[in-house]
Amino acid sequence: MEANNQTSDRRAPLIAAGIFLGLGLGGFVDGILLHQILQWHHMLSSVRPLTNESNIDLNMVWDGLFDAFDWLLTVVGVVLLWRAGGRNDVPWSSYTFVGSLLIGAGLFNLVEGLIAHQILGIHHVKPGPHQLAWDLGFLASGVLMILVGWMMLNQKLRSPSQE
């Protein structure tokens, strides 16, 4: 049991880097795919619909702030990864890193989905007659990514020889 705790503690810098990168990249996937390519929603599109130039401008500003926040999370993740890479005591593992990325991206979907979609209602994944289903699917994707990431991290704890 103690060996597992030591392995877990040594992996912490890599896990933190992966989670921050996952948060930032998860936000970029949302912003690029849902806001820009599919144009299903924008940050304030449920409270300021894209019906006039003023609302379009306001939504673009908030989309830009959202992207800037995602960029900041990604930069923090890169810095943490760089620092972890300079340490000899951090075991490098694809399972640890990818699991952490999934946890971060899943946390993004879960937190953003709960706050923006459900609590504040400032936008929905795909507005329309089935918007609750799309919102719940977004939340479920977050939970699924967190669970898979957690299983990947715990698999490595049970198999330290594969580090």
Image (cartoon, rainbow, N blue to C red):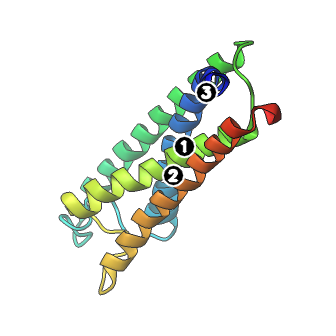
Q: Secondary structure at mark 1?
A: helix
Taking the spot 63% from the left edge, 26% from the top edge, the residue there is 11
**Label 1 sits on residue:** 22
Give the vertical position of 115 relative to 163 (above or below).
below
Amino acid type, callout 1: Gly
What percent of the width, then of the height, locates residue 28? 51, 50
What percent of the width, then of the height, locates residue 57? 28, 56
Amino acid type, callout 2: Ile
Query: Of the residues under marks 2 and 3, which one precedes in the sequence?
Result: 3
For residue 122, say whether it is visible: no
Q: Quadrant of residue 95?
A: top right
Q: Nearer the viewer, residue 139 or 37?
A: 139
The answer for how far apart the CA atoms under marks 2 and 3 are is: 17 Å
**Label 2 sits on residue:** 146
The answer for how far apart the CA atoms under marks 1 and 2 are is: 11 Å
**Label 3 sits on residue:** 8
Query: Of the residues under marks 1 and 3, which one precedes in the sequence?
Result: 3
Camera-near label (2 vs 3) is 3
